Image (cartoon, rainbow, N blue to C red):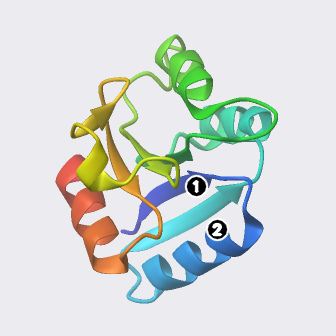
Amino acid sequence: MAKKILIIDDEKDFCWFVKSNLEVNGEFQIMTSNSGKDGLNKAKKEIPDLILLDILIPDMEGPAVAEQLANCRNTRDIPIIFLTAIIREEEAESSIAGRQFIAKPVETEKLRDAIRAAIF
């Protein structure tokens, strides 16, 4: 059965690109949201296996979304991988706010490997 992944990112083209690449082999079922508030609602309703979360979202920044998810009984155990264009991998530690991150632009195989490591 495909693992459910929720992408919360305000860039619609980016969401489409990642969704298209991750769904190609049927391993993942991708849902997308283009705002923090909508992403929170989808996460609480759908209970995905993992969330890919942008750091900078206009209505609610990624760390605030992650904090609200962590404070909810139904979503606190969902793994989150931050996606960001503001920090390159060679510039940062291996986590942001105690969570794994992947720098944009995202390499599909690297993203797949990170998802698999987090949920399998």
Q: Name which quarter of the figure residue 113 lies in.
A: bottom left
Pinpoint residue 22: horizontal percent, then vertical percent: 44, 77
Pinpoint residue 57: horizontal percent, then vertical percent: 71, 41
Judge by depth and name the residue closer to the eye, 103 or 53.
Answer: 103
Mark 2 residue element: helix
Q: Tell me if 10 is positioned left or right of 77 in this view.
A: right
Q: Amino acid at mark 2?
A: Cys
Judge by depth and name the residue closer to the eye, 17 or 77.
Answer: 17
Q: Earlier in the sequence, mark 2 or mark 1?
A: 1
Labelled disc at residue 15: 2
User: Height in image: 87 above or below 69?
Assistant: below
Residue found 53% across the figure and 39% down from its top: 47
Q: Tell me if 55 is positioned left or right of 13 in this view.
A: left
Residue found 67% across the figure and 59% down from its top: 32
Q: Badge 1: few (under 14), some or many (20 or more) residues near its Cα, within 10 Å?
A: many
Q: Amino acid at mark 1?
A: Ile
* In the image, farthest residue toward the bottom: 24
Judge by depth and name the residue closer to the eye, 73 or 90.
Answer: 90
Residue found 35% across the figure and 38% down from its top: 79
In the picture, the quarter occupied by the N terminus is bottom left
Mark 2 vs 1: CB contact within 8 A: yes
User: Height in image: 23 above or below 57?
Assistant: below
In this figure, which residue is indicated by the disc labeled 1?
7
Pinpoint residue 117: horizontal percent, then vertical percent: 18, 54
Count how many numbered circles sit on residues in the image: 2
Q: Badge 2: few (under 14), some or many (20 or more) residues near its Cα, within 10 Å?
A: many
Residue found 68% across the figure and 32% down from its top: 40
